[in-house]
Image: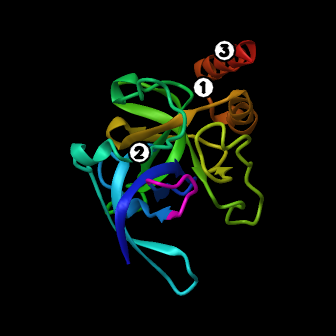
Amino acid sequence: MRDRPCVISGTRPDGSLTWHAADARQPRGSLPIELVPEGVRVGSEVRITAERDASGNWKVLECAVPIPEREQHSLLIAPRVQPPHTPTHAHLALGQIRLTNVRNPIENSLNTGKNRPALLVSGNDKQWRIMGFTTKSHYEDGQPRTPIPNYIAIGLDGPGYFWGRRLTRVDNIDIGSYIGNADHALLTSLLNLARSDLYMEEIAQVRQATSNLAKAD
């Protein structure tokens, strides 16, 4: 068993995080979403207690934060490249990839939701319409899901898929850590997949964002 300073290095489509020891650069294991302390995101410094399982993989038993400031200067940080100021809830915007808690109170009033990365499409100061991501490659009926193009470019550490052909509505309070931003390919795939569910103003906004990204390239 080991208890040592670590760095959160990435996010997976299922909502879990990857981590590595502070003195290393390669991911050592996966941090289940239920063990992620509040406020932790890619680049955060944490202290992880883990042990190897029968397969030799690291299994996280506990994740604590923050590390005292007197220890932080000695850590070798290797976070994913992010904007100088990570967007907060006051700066939610079309194209952001964020960790969200998707609930289903209509089918289950006791449902507490499931955390998963999602693409923000349109919203206001109360709710946003999002497209969730998943690691499941097929729908329940066996039909293949649409893969996420260039998943590394948008901040994910592994391949994933669009959850469905329709957007989901979530409360702002259920929108969490910033992961990355959509690229041209992701927004184009969204338009092709969910066009019938998008409002006219959403289509116009996504098209404009896609055009801006194309010009930037």
Name which of mark 3 and mark 2 comes first in the sequence: 2
At a point 53% along the width and 87% down the height, the residue shown is 54
Could you say where residue 168 lies in the image, as x and y percent from the top left? 51, 42
Res. 208 mark: 3
Can residue 111 be spotted in the picture?
Answer: no
Could you say where residue 30 lies in the image, as x and y percent from the top left? 50, 63
Viewer-side label of 3, 2: 2
Q: Residues within 10 Å of mark 2 (few under 14, many from 20)?
A: many
Name which of mark 3 and mark 1 comes first in the sequence: 1
Can residue 100 be spotted in the picture?
Answer: yes
What whole-number distance in Å separates the C-alpha atoms at marks 2 and 1? Answer: 32 Å
Q: Residues within 10 Å of mark 3 (few under 14, many from 20)?
A: few
Res. 147 mark: none
- Classify residue 142 by image quadrant: bottom right
Decide if residue 63 is on the left or right side of residue 25: left
Q: Residues within 10 Å of mark 1 (few under 14, many from 20)?
A: few
**In the structure shown, which secondary structural element does the residue marked by tag 1 occupy?**
loop
Count of numbered circles in the view: 3
Could you say where residue 180 lies in the image, as x and y percent from the top left? 54, 35
Viewer-closest of 185 and 51: 51
What stretch of residues is rendered in magenta?
Answer: 22-29
Viewer-side label of 3, 1: 3
CB within 8 Å, label 2 to label 1: no
Res. 199 mark: 1
Viewer-closest of 38 and 7: 7
Res. 41 mark: 2
**In the structure shown, which secondary structural element does the residue marked by tag 2 occupy?**
loop
Viewer-closest of 136 and 166: 136
In the rendered image, the vertical position of residue 135 relative to residue 190, given as above or below: below
Where the N terminus falls, by quadrant?
bottom left
Where the C terminus falls, by quadrant?
top right
What whole-number distance in Å separates the C-alpha atoms at marks 3 and 2? Answer: 29 Å
